[in-house]
Amino acid sequence: MKTLKAAAAALSLLACTTTSFAQAWPTKTLTWVVPFAAGGPTDAMARDIADKVAKQIGQQIIIENAGGAGGTIGAGKAAKANADGYTFLVGHLGYMAAAPSLYKKLTYDPVKDFEPVFRFPDTPLVLLVPKASPHKSAADLIAYAKKNPGKVNFGNAGAGSTSHLIAALFESKAGIDVVSVPYKGAAPAMNDLIAGQVDAMFDQTNTALPQVAGGRLVALALTSKATMAQFPGVAPLADKALPGFEAATWYGLYAPKGTPKDVITKMHQAYLKALGDKAWTQKMADQGIRLLPEAQYAPDAFAKHTAAEIEVWRRVATDAKITID
Ligand code: ASP
């Protein structure tokens, strides 16, 4: 009897701890790992979303920039973080979908080591060249690269980053041979592009726009199928240069495997509430960011998307012969 009573007491204590954890979360500052340098498109989007989610959950969210190897270093670090609901990873199609097909040794498994929390809106990319570039269109750049194999340098955010993968896809579809110049994020790559140290780069619309609008860079083409009001006179690659070409970056928040379900639900709910602010979503749309139907932001839909994209990139990497040395 005594033992039974003790067991019951222990059980109710356990139940109490679990509920009070669930009710109390979050009691301290959260960290979102961004595996690229500050000032790039992932960082900018993560900071904006973190700021809005933080207001909903009533706790600060700190962004930790952990760049290198196309995001795989930061992702590996986040995979090993405590699954206590206080550390998250901002993931994208590179290190959470393409990496298993590109890297021989990966310190994490995008599916087995993480719980999807919510998907961000998508972002198309822009083909950029420096102001003084001799290439005035995507067709010009392709024609020049065809005549001069290995002469055109493309800056990117690291091996397997979106900027690298989309450039590799472009290279394969155009039948050209360009040189990849990796950085620890799109921000340092962009600085060198502005300075004319590299010849071209694909960057996401949200960070490309201010540079193009400010006249520091020229946009040659878009990876979206349709034109964008934010980039007047800039044609989609699919229009003339590369029929059928279409690409966009997807992002989302992941938690280390084992993070309490309740935390994931609360984070997702907080994000949906934040998205109810139409002035904010309009601001994102003005940067060329593509909002999604609400159901696609959900953890289960994001899990399915991640798994499907791993397969998509397995095919793309093989077909386009994308490799990482
Ligand atoms: N997301 C970018 C890329 O993969 C990198 C960055 O945000 O700095 O190209």
Image (cartoon, grey):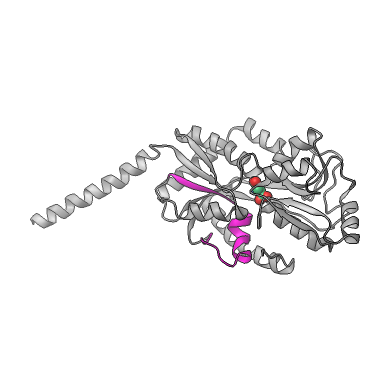
- Residue 90 in percent (x, y) is at 56, 47
Image label count:
0
- Residue 104 in percent (x, y) is at 59, 67
**Is-magenta flag for residue 101?**
yes
Whether 171 is drawn above or below 29: the answer is below
Q: Is residue 85 left or right of residue 192?
A: left
User: Magenta region: which residues?
Assistant: 86-110
Locate residue 238: give its quadrant: bottom right
- Residue 106 in percent (x, y) is at 55, 63
Q: Residue furthest left?
A: 1
Q: Is residue 82 left or right of residue 137?
A: left
Q: Is residue 292 visible?
A: no
Q: Quadrant of the C terminus?
A: bottom right
What residue is shown at x 45% (from left), y 34% (from top)? 59
Q: Is residue 199 visible?
A: yes
What residue is shown at x 63% (from left), y 49% (from top)? 184
Q: Quadrant of the N terminus?
A: bottom left
Depth order, front residue of 189/26? 189
- Residue 178 in percent (x, y) is at 80, 59
**Is-magenta flag for residue 97?**
yes
Q: Is residue 145 left or right of residue 257?
A: right
